[in-house]
Image: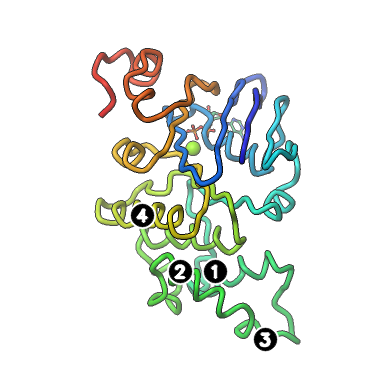
């Protein structure tokens, strides 16, 4: 479904992404792991068109989407959430999801189409699917951190994606919230048939839900393989765990 080939992005001479490779098959859950600064977020920004690569290519369903602007990438049904929570704080939970659905439909709030009537059903369906239906009327700023991260996923779903990219979905969450988020990601994959690419520091989560894992260090792909292959790979041990001889997990 998605293929990244030798992607490179330089910031003022510094290679943040340096020949990254990735392939994701339809229906898979793929994790990207790597230390802070490895280039994971930059890679996601390159795939979604927020940044343009210096070289390399991104293919989505065999179509070259390299360097296309974010709104076009979104129309191809690739959506993402951000590492740093990115919601309209003073709007309700419902409105935040509603606006993401409206954005997809190319509709906007105006005098002639009372916003409340638009896409109510779909917005509620999304809120239901992520477990936020009871909080639809809450002001987003009042949500717990965990709920706000889930709201971000709900907003990504507003684009009706086939391919969902989650940047550290559980960052800063309490243990209980993390468990809920794991269940949600599994459900999005199993029940809604989404293909999911995410990056995450919580190794327990990574190994419990990923079909395959890509390991990124200093902008480059070290390996992409099954959990087993990655767990005891020597290069991963050296680079990622600083030479520890204990297997991951
Ligand atoms: P990760 O998500 O794996 O922690 P990032 O992709 O955020 O890593 O960052 C990779 C490297 O690129 C870091 O050293 C970061 O400081 C640098 N970087 C990221 N974005 C920019 C930018 N817009 N300008 C300059 N340097 C950047
Ligand atoms: Mg990051």
Judging by the rendered image, the residue that carries numbered circle 4 is 181
At 52% from the left and 33% from the top, the residue drawn is: 40
Q: Are marks 3 and 2 in contact (CB under 8 Å)?
A: no
Of callouts 3 and 2, the N-terminal one? 3
Quadrant in which the N terminus is drawn: top right
Calculate the distance from the C-alpha at mark 1 to the C-alpha at mark 2: 8 Å
The mark closer to the camera, 4 or 1, is: 4
Residue 179 place in picture, x, y as percent: 29, 53
Q: Is residue 218 left or right of residue 183?
A: right
Residue 200's quadrant in the figure? Answer: top left
C-alpha separation, residue under disc 3 versus residue under disc 2: 21 Å
Label 3 Cα neighbours within 10 Å, binned few <14 / some 14-19 / many ≥20: few
Residue 39, above or below 245 = below
Q: Residue at x 50, y 55 (%)?
A: 193
Judge by depth and name the residue closer to the eye, 22 or 134.
22
Say which residue label 1 marks: 96
Q: Which residue is mark 3?
A: 114
Q: Residue 52 at what x, y percent from top left?
A: 72, 35
Per the image, the residue denoted by label 2 is 140
Find the distance from the CA under tag 3 to the CA under tag 4.
33 Å
Mark 2 Cβ inside 8 Å of ligand 2:
no
- Local SS, label 4: helix
User: What is the distance, in whole Å, between disc 4 and disc 1 at their CAs?
Assistant: 19 Å
Does residue 121 appear in the picture of this structure?
Answer: yes
Q: Earlier in the sequence, mark 4 or mark 1?
A: 1
Q: Position of residue 156 (x, y in %)?
A: 55, 58
Q: Quadrant of residue 117?
A: bottom right
Label 3: element kind: loop
**Under tag 2, what secondary structure?**
helix
Q: Is 129 situated left or right of 66 in this image?
A: left
> Is residue 152 shown to the viewer in this render?
no
């Amino acid at each position: 479904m998605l293929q990244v080939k030798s992607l490179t992005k330089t910031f003022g001479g510094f290679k943040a992404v340096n020949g990254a490779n990735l392939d994701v098959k339809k229906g898979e859950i793929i994790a990207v792991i790597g230390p802070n600064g490895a280039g994971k977020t930059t890679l996601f920004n390159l795939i979604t068109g927020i940044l343009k690569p210096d070289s390399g290519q991104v293919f989505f369903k065999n179509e070259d989407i390299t360097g296309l602007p974010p709104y076009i990438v979104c129309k191809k049904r690739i959506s993402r959430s951000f590492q740093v929570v990115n919601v309209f704080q003073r709007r309700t939970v419902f409105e935040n999801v509603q606006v993401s659905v409206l954005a997809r439909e190319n509709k906007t709030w105006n005098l002639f189409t009372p916003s409340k009537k638009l896409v109510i059903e779909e917005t509620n369906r999304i809120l239901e699917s992520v477990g936020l239906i009871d909080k639809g009327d809450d002001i987003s700023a009042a949500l717990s951190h965990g709920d706000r991260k889930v709201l971000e996923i709900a907003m990504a779903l507003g684009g009706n994606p086939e391919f969902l990219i989650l940047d550290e979905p559980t960052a800063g969450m309490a243990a209980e919230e993390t468990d809920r988020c794991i269940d949600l990601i599994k459900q999005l994959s199993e029940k809604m048939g989404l293909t999911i690419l995410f990056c995450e520091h919580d190794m327990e989560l990574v190994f419990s839900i990923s079909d395959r894992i890509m390991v990124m260090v200093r902008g480059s792909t070290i390996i992409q393989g099954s959990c087993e292959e990655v767990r005891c790979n020597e290069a991963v041990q050296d680079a990622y765990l600083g030479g520890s001889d204990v297997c991951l997990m």
